[in-house]
Amino acid sequence: MALTLNEASKLSNNMLLQGVVETIIKNSPILQKLPFIEIVGNGLTYNQENTLPSIDFYDVGDPWNESTPTFEQVTTTLKIMGGDADIDNFLKATRSNIQDLEAAVIELKAKALKDKFEETVIYGDPAVNAKQFDGLRKLIDTTTASSQVIAMGATGATLTLDKLDELIDAVKGGKPDILLMSRRTRRKINNLVRASGSGMMVTEKDSFGNFVQLWDSIPVGVNDWILDTHTLDSSLETATTGGSCSTIYAVQFGEGALCGLTSPGYLQVEPIGSLETKDASRTRIKWYCSLALFSAIKAAALIGITD
């Protein structure tokens, strides 16, 4: 059973953990919605659905044609992410009347973990850093031609609403659960909507009171780590720096689509205690996690978006 990080934290009586989780997901559109599957062991091997089998009509006596779906076996291993937060005992004793120093330090560490996860969800690549898990750019593979990679021209072009609709239609079996993009791209969509007078963009509040924009009823999620410097050649991404292009990712969430993987217990907040070499106490935030795309048709990317 897959649970979001927020729902999983409700099953814990650890108030510190619940506070850290709320800090992490409050301003993270993807962590608010991404479900996680608990796995036993250090990895998961699964069959990724690529294409469906075909179905035909037949007359009496016709020979029947066999057609099977195609799969690719994928192995995803859990990765270790986290960090230590040290609180100086002198400052804790003398400054806590102004602010809870320990809470402030742990909160900042939690925000840093959120930032690193959001960055890795997009650009994670074990070929570049073996300690990372595969991100969306690698799982969709925007460097290889496929029906899930849509380009704004051979070397990039200005975004259009028609191309945005084409991206949404590339995700099969229902609409995407989120559209992930940079702030520059969101500004461009707002500009296009105002210019066209379209009523397709609406705003609502999420469970944390944040205002969220929706395009065609799909939440628009801003990821501050999506770069606006990608380069394209022949309608495929060649690099993430050196150019002026950006990408929108359209994703479905769930056990048959994009899902997070985690060890039992999800995120952990571990009090290490007093340190031997300095007058301070340490708290460790750690997470054994990864990402899995169970069906290739549940995610797509629109590449080559210029300003």
Image: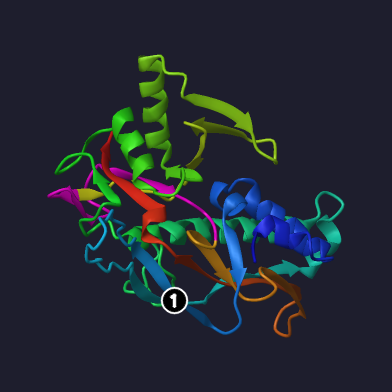
Amino acid, disc 1: Lys
Q: Which one is in front, 113 or 215?
A: 215
Q: Residue furthest front?
A: 60
- Give the quarter of the figure containing the C terminus: top left
**Image height of 187 relative to 16, above or below:** above
Residue at 22 percent of width and 62 percent of height? 62
From the top left corner, tell me how far across and down residue 197 is, in percent: 41, 14
Q: Which one is in front, 224 or 260?
A: 260
Residue on which the image places disc 1: 131
Regarding residue 15, the answer to whether it shows in the image is yes
From the top left corner, tell me how far across and down residue 200 is, in percent: 46, 24
**Image height of 302 relative to 240, above or below:** above
Residue at 25 percent of width and 66 percent of height? 64
Regarding residue 160, the answer to whether it shows in the image is no
Name the image quarter holding residue 193.
top left
In this image, 227 relative to 220: left or right?
left
Name the image quarter holding residue 136.
bottom left
Which secondary structure, mark 1?
A: loop
In this image, 201 relative to 82: left or right?
left
Q: What stretch is highlighted in magenta?
A: 232-254
- Give the quarter of the figure containing the N terminus: bottom right
In this image, 226 relative to 273: left or right?
left
Q: Which one is in front, 85 or 197?
A: 197
